[in-house]
Amino acid sequence: MRRQKIRLALGTRIEFWAVSKGQSPAEFQFRILQGDQLLWGVKRFSEFSEFYSYHHREAGEVEFEWDESRTDFTWAYAYNPRTVSKTGITVLEFGEHLVERTGPEIDSWCAADLQRPRLHFSPVKNWMNDPNGLCKVGDVWHLFYQFHPGGTDWGPMHWGHATSHDLCAWLHMPVFLRPEQNLARLGATGGAFSGSAFKDREGKIKFYYTERLPAYDLFADYREVQKIAEPGRNLINAERIATVLEIRPEGVKHDFRDPKVWWNDAANAYRMILGASIYGDPAVLLYGSDDGLEWQYLGLLYRAPVNFREEGARAVECPDFFRLEDKWVLVMGFVGHIEPTTRRHNLLYALIGEFVDDRFVPDTPELQLLDFGTDYYAMQSFEAEGRQIAFAWLFNWEYRKPEGSAYSGEMSLPRVLSLSEDKRKICMLPAIEVDEHQVAIPLAADQSGGYSLPGGPIEIRLSGSLQGSKLVATEGGELAFEVGVVDGIVSIRLAQDDGSIRYVAELAGGEDLRLFHDCGIIEIFADGGAVCGTRRGYVNIDPDRLEISSSALAEVFERYSK
């Protein structure tokens, strides 16, 4: 047994997920003591991951006692509800000793992982996927995300949470939502799936999300219901949760998720969309409500052409619908879809049009590909300060993070959405905060015309004709990434690619390109953001050499956060 003293402030909460690795000979596998008094304890942890919570009622020194050899604490932290919004959580690591890390100590620990990107948000530990509940309250940005505290693989879903004052530096917060049942004990998956934030008519923030009830098959026969969560002070915890929708329309089977809610002035009522599949076709469903609690099905907002079903698409995931300038924009991911000519999968598409009398009429039926890579998925956008800001999950299931990493999953840079001058395309560019709160130091080309890279994030900018341009980054002489423009087509290739999938897009003007590289993450913005491409690689992720062949003006910068 290990023992260590620690001081706890009045009101401190300890929250952790733990699983037993074997029968303990001790009377307790975990105890909190004050002198000889037992304040709280767990006699036996389960063979299944479970959540535990302790609320400390008095300030003072206590002693933790734990069976390190027979208990796996997969995620543990402490926080004080009165101060956590300023300090964030204190991560607890129960090993041979108890290690506490708060704020800058967490950042330093994460930065010591040379495989972890520097400019992109990632969880301290364990699995992360879709961004959720994005919003700004006062001067604080809130990022919620799909999170599995039980390990670095996808599992029962929770909502993780982080806050920021600049969209670049993030403070880690307590887990916001948990599954309504212990799914690990049931041998099931599911939990608190994706959802979005909504400010009601009284200005209160609420969160609509999907709960997948215990599921025993990842592809069929699961049940998904829609819930509303009302947060407590400072959005630290979900204090009140209620189910608001559980009846599916005819033709909709198990895919019925990812709500996005808004107030519709024309109808003087609430509206909500959900991703689904109707009679086998990926679709977006439209619902209406007078109070945000009781919802009625209004019909289909969108139904995908039959080719999507034929090409493997099972459903629409994470739909987004919002007003942008004087247009309405619908964004969708088609889960399971494989684009036949390039073999890319799970691509993100958008339509621009009008929304009148609860009908969305696209200006053209042709879907716009929002990102020509396959690692920009589950995008969620939100309106703040007159801007439509978006994050996405950088992952595609094609490649997995190498074994041994403390975490899996990153978010994109924050992007701002706009319309092209002719209003036919959605453009995405890095939010101004990326330049305001990150340093860009110019790198000079050497005598051979190439660049020796210092290690860490870089940015490449090309201004002028991109035709014939070629960017090649290598690590120890081996390919890290290659970007080229041939006959008006931009393409990207990573070291891990075997050529079976082509990552390409057609340029229009082809006069500008920005490329960010951050420890295997590449984000490309070309044609004023009308063409974007995102990839996440895990091979040769720290290039030391860059060669640029282009008639355009080339600039290379070392990037790091202030």
Image (cartoon, rainbow, N blue to C red):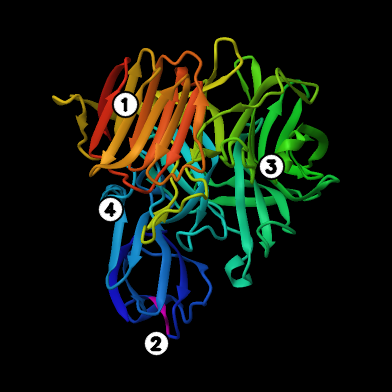
Asked whether the beta carbons under mark 3 and mark 2 sit within 8 Å of each other, the answer is no
Mark 2, Cα crowd under 10 Å, few <14 / some 14-19 / many 20+, is: few
Callout 4: SS: helix
Q: Is residue 545 visible?
A: yes
Tell me the amino acid under the disc marked 4. Trp
Callout 1: SS: strand
Callout 2: SS: loop
Q: Nearer the viewer, residue 272 or 443?
A: 443
- What segment carries the magenta color? 26-31
Please report whichever mark, 1 or 2, sits nearer to the chain's N-terminal start: 2
Q: CA distance from mark 1 to mark 4?
A: 28 Å
**Mark 1 sits on what residue?**
460
Q: CA distance from mark 4 to mark 2?
A: 32 Å
- Left or right: where does residue 334 sit relative to residue 153? right
Asked whether the beta carbons under mark 4 and mark 2 sit within 8 Å of each other, the answer is no
Q: Is residue 236 above or below residue 472?
A: below
Q: Is residue 105 above or below residue 490?
A: below
Mark 1 or mark 3, whichever is nearer to me: 3
**Mark 2 sits on what residue?**
26
Tell me the amino acid under the disc marked 2. Ala
- The residue shown at (74%, 34%) is 304
- Left or right: where does residue 26 sit relative to residue 391? left
Please report whichever mark, 1 or 3, sits nearer to the chain's N-terminal start: 3
